[in-house]
Amino acid sequence: MKQFMIMRHCSAEGQEDEAPLTKLGIRQAQVVATFMEHYPVEVDFILSSPAKRAINSVVPLAKEEDIDIETDERLLERHVSAKPLKDMESFLETSFKNYHVKLEDGESNQEAMDRVAGLLDELFEEVEEDAVPLLVTHGNLFILILNYLGIEAGFTEWKELTHPDLYMVTKKDGSFGLSRIWSD
């Protein structure tokens, strides 16, 4: 696999796995499908987080392109805490500075990155060189994927991600490059 696309899901009504897309998110998903219909690189398969908001972000694209949506739990968002945090943003900023920081019932950035690393390694080994998968995930994990690939990203880049957001990751001479292909 020389390149793949990575997408952050469309606007959703919450962070729970069963949270649906908002009305805006439903429209965004259709816009993504239309955008991809005209994009010069064709998606060969879709691999999504099993969270409802991630899957529903690509249902119109999958229908338009007649592609199945496969799911993999390793693309789920990082589990920060079972309890609501008063200042989630501050905690996330700290966790991007120290990848081992975690709450008692949560997952650290390092643990989440290790989880998704197994999936990425499998894709690099098993996917044909010219195939272009679309990975659909969540903001925190999106940034961790980039870091695993050696593309430096952190809290600032996480804050700059939009709902949805879409990037092309290209491998050349053993290193990875990143280009944003989505525009609001």
Image: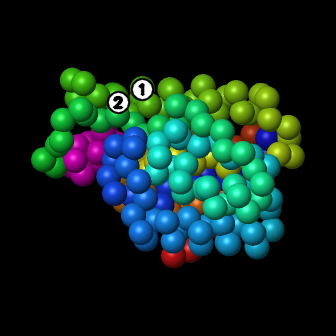
Image coords of residue 41 (percent x, y): 80, 62
In the image, is residue 94 part of the stretch drawn in magenta?
yes
Please tell me whether mark 2 sits on a helix, a strand or a loop.
loop
At a point 22% along the width and 47% down the height, the residue shown is 88
Residue named by callout 1: 111
Among the 4 quarters of the image, the one containing residue 99: top left
Q: Residues within 10 Å of mark 1 (few under 14, many from 20)?
A: some
Task: Relative to 27, say whether 73 is above or below.
Answer: above
The stretch in magenta equals 88-97
Query: In the rendering, which numbered label is found on residue 17?
Result: none
- 110 to 59, vertically: above or below: above
Q: Is residue 26 left or right of residue 172?
A: left
Residue 85: image location, x then y, percent? 17, 43
Nearest to the observer: residue 152 or residue 180: 180
Q: Give the image location of residue 175, x and y in percent.
A: 70, 43
Q: Which quadrant of the structure image shows residue 124?
A: top right
Camera-side residue: 148 or 88?
A: 88
Q: Quadrant of the N terminus?
A: top right
Q: How many marks overall?
A: 2
Give the number of the disc on residue 108: 2
Callout 2 crowding tier (Cα within 10 Å): few <14, some 14–19, many ≥20: many
Residue at the (52%, 31%) spot, across then down = 73
Residue 27 magenta-highlighted: no
Q: Are marks 1 and 2 in contact (CB under 8 Å)?
A: yes
Amino acid, disc 1? Glu
Kindly identify the amino acid type of the residue bearing the numbered disc 2.
Ser
